Every structure is written in C-alpha cells, then in structure tokens.
C-alpha cells in the first residue's frame, strides 16, 4: 500500500512530463491478461519506458476478467482500471480509457498481444524525438485470419475510401500512440456513436505509420463475429460519408427522367397508332425492381436517421461501474 501511495504521488508529479498511459480494452480476456502483464513488465525495464501506467477497461466481461484485473492492480501499482457497467463495445471502452488516461502520451493497445507491446519504444521515439503527434501501426499481412474476413475487410477499405473524405489506411490497427494534444482533441469530440478508426484520421495531426507482420492472439478467441464486423463497417460508412444519400438522389433523378421519357413515348404512340399496351409480365418486373430500389434507399435514409436519433438522445458511450 505504501509503495502504491508513493508511486501514486510519483505519477502525479510526472503526469505532465513523462508518463505513458496504455489504454487496454478488455472483454472476456481473463486468460490473456497475465501474458499481457508479463510483456509489460519486460517493457518497463527498457530505457524510456519506465514511467508506464496501464489503464485496463473492463468492457462488461462475463468471465473473471474483472477479478484478474483487480489482482493485477493489487500486485502492481502501475495498473489502474475502469470497469463498465455492461458490454458497450470496443469503441466505448477505448473512450473510457482515453478519458481515464493521465499520461503525456497515450497508447491504445489490445489485451491479446496482437498489438506487440515491443513496438512501443519505436513509437515513443517518433513522438519524443521526431515531433509526431500520432503514431499508427498497420499490419502488412493478415496471416492467420479467415480468408473471407480478409476479403471483406479489403472491400470495406476500398469502399469507404472511395466514399469518404477521411481516408483510412488498409490494415491499420487501433494500436496507436497519441500525444496529449491528440488525445484531448479526440475526447473533446461530442459524438457518442464513435468510429475510432475514422476519428483518428479526422482529428488530423502529423502521423507516422509503423508496419508489422500480423501476430495471432496469445489465448482466447476473437470477439468479432462476421455480423458484428458487418455492422461495424456499415457504422463506419454512415459516420464518415453521406455518399449513399447522394447516390439515392442521383438514381432517383435518373429514374424519374427515364420514366418521363417513357410516358411521353407511350402517350404519343397511343395518339398516333392507338396501340394498346401489352406486356404485363415486364411491367410487374419493373415494379418489383423499382420497389426494391426504393426500399433499399429508404433503408439507407433510416440508417442515417437512426444515427441522428441515437445522437439526439445524448446517451453516453459507456457507464462506469467501478474505478481503481
Ligand atoms: N474488446 C472490447 N469490447 C468488445 C470487443 C472487444 O473491449 O466488445 C476488446 C478485446 O478484449 C481486445 C480488443 O478489443 O482487447 C480487440 O478484440 P479482438 O482481439 O477480439 O479483435 P480482433 O483482434 O480479432 O480484431
Ligand atoms: Mg485481437
């Protein structure tokens, strides 16, 4: 306890100068946290990484993650935690962690060691000596990932980059090191339905990219099902682009114009030749097709409306149940 208190004071004194905070969102990571702490202990021995605090965010885990974190907190004074009242998703957990972090530099890192902690010294060098405010990491390959998932991920990056003004880097991880300036900018954004990958780009700042080979999880399983990823991708596009709405306006105009020409043609034909209209089947096909197009775009409208609705309600991105 004494040790903890003195380290607490030490944190306050250094928070302005040298403290590095690691924000680690955890959802059912009871088996991975011990491996993670082991890596961090190794990291803390390296020059320049001694002043490191870890902020675990327990994102409503249903296993023993919270007690594992509490135990880490008891064993190591550099560990702090925030525990959310339920599972709010990684985005909410990251925001909670960024708000709790006190460091001059803040890194966001997964608990499963897929974001290698040993890259941190290199990242720190960029913010300390090379005047960057943000260091991002990107996987150069997706080895070990299901083929279908990689395929869809690539398609998503191509789509969002062609639709949105904010450009996302393919393979970019959420693993980032940010300066206090960048963190303050991020947490000052008032939106509650957050798509971090886009927000990091949106706030700007000089960013250095570090590349690494994909690493597989040390233990446990990925928390992202195909459906969850699909929802995440749609969220991302709706958060950072209104191009789908423009497409619907354009298509609507095009179809109206075409139908206008068609009506004109039919009227003239009727007047000149008194030709009766046949082709019931093709008519039904056209009606079904157009109804489909309409429903699709009403769906897109609904998507944006639901985002507005969610923001208007002003519900927070997470609720804290317990803090160290
Ligand atoms: N995570 C979270 N809340 C969630 C899902 C995931 O905090 O609802 C955390 C998880 O504990 C891990 C990180 O986000 O530290 C990345 O999750 P995961 O490894 O499952 O994703 P992947 O690496 O497969 O993309
Ligand atoms: Mg992972």
Image (cartoon, rainbow, N blue to C red):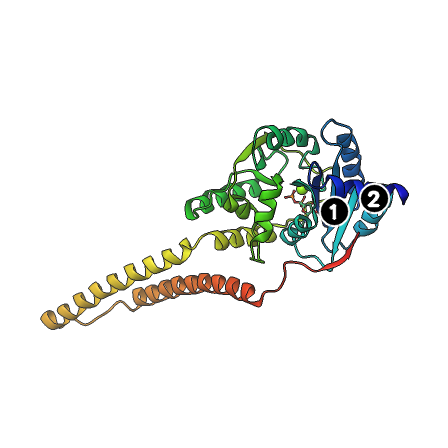
* Residue 112 locus on image (x, y percent): 72, 40
Q: Label 2, on which residue?
A: 72
Q: Mark 2 or mark 1, which is nearer the start of the sequence?
A: 1
* Residue 273 locus on image (x, y percent): 11, 70
* Residue 192 locus on image (x, y percent): 58, 58
Q: Is residue 209 above or below residue 321?
A: above
SS for dot 1: strand
Q: Residue furthest left?
A: 272
SS for dot 2: helix
User: Are the residues flagged by discs 1 and 2 in contact, CB closer than 8 Å?
Assistant: yes
Quadrant that contains the N terminus: top right
Residue 178 visible (yes or no): yes
Q: Residues within 10 Å of mark 1 (few under 14, many from 20)?
A: many
Q: Is residue 273 above or below residue 198?
A: below
78 on left or right of 274: right
Identity of the residue drawn at 66% across and 37% down = 115
Q: Residues within 10 Å of mark 2 (few under 14, many from 20)?
A: some
Ligand 2 quadrant in view? top right
Q: Label 1, on which residue?
A: 56
Q: Is residue 261 above or below residue 90?
A: below
């Amino acid at each position: 306890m004494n040790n903890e208190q003195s380290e607490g004071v030490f944190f306050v004194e250094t928070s302005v100068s040298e403290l590095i905070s690691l924000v680690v969102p955890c959802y059912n990571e009871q088996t991975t946290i011990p491996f993670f702490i082991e890596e961090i202990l190794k990291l803390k021995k390296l020059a320049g990484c001694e002043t490191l605090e870890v902020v675990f965010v327990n994102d409503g885990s249903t296993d023993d993650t919270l007690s594992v974190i509490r135990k880490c907190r008891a064993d190591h004074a550099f560990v702090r935690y925030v525990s959310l009242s339920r599972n709010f998703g990684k985005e909410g957990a990251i925001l909670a962690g960024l708000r709790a972090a006190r460091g001059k530099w803040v890194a966001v890192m997964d608990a499963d060691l897929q974001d290698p902690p040993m890259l941190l010294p290199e990242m720190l060098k960029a913010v300390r000596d090379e005047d960057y405010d943000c260091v991002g990491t990107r996987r150069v390959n997706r080895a070990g990932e299901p083929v279908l998932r990689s395929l869809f991920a690539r398609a998503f990056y191509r789509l969002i980059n062609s639709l949105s003004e904010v450009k996302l880097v393919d393979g970019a991880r959420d693993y980032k090191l940010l300066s206090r300036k960048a963190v303050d900018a991020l947490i000052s954004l008032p939106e509650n339905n957050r798509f971090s990958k886009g927000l990091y780009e949106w706030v700007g700042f000089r960013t250095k990219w570090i590349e690494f080979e994909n690493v597989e999880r040390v233990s446990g399983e990925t928390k992202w099902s195909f459906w969850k990823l699909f929802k995440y991708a749609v969220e991302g596009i709706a958060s950072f682009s209104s191009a789908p709405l423009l497409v619907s306006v354009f298509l609507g105009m095009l179809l109206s114009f075409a139908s206008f020409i068609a009506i004109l043609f039919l009227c003239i034909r009727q007047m000149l030749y008194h030709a009766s209209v046949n082709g019931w089947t093709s008519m039904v096909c056209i009606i079904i097709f157009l109804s489909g197009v309409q429903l699709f775009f009403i769906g897109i409208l609904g998507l944006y409306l639901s985002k507005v609705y969610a923001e208007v309600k002003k519900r927070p991105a997470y609720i804290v149940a317990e803090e160290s």
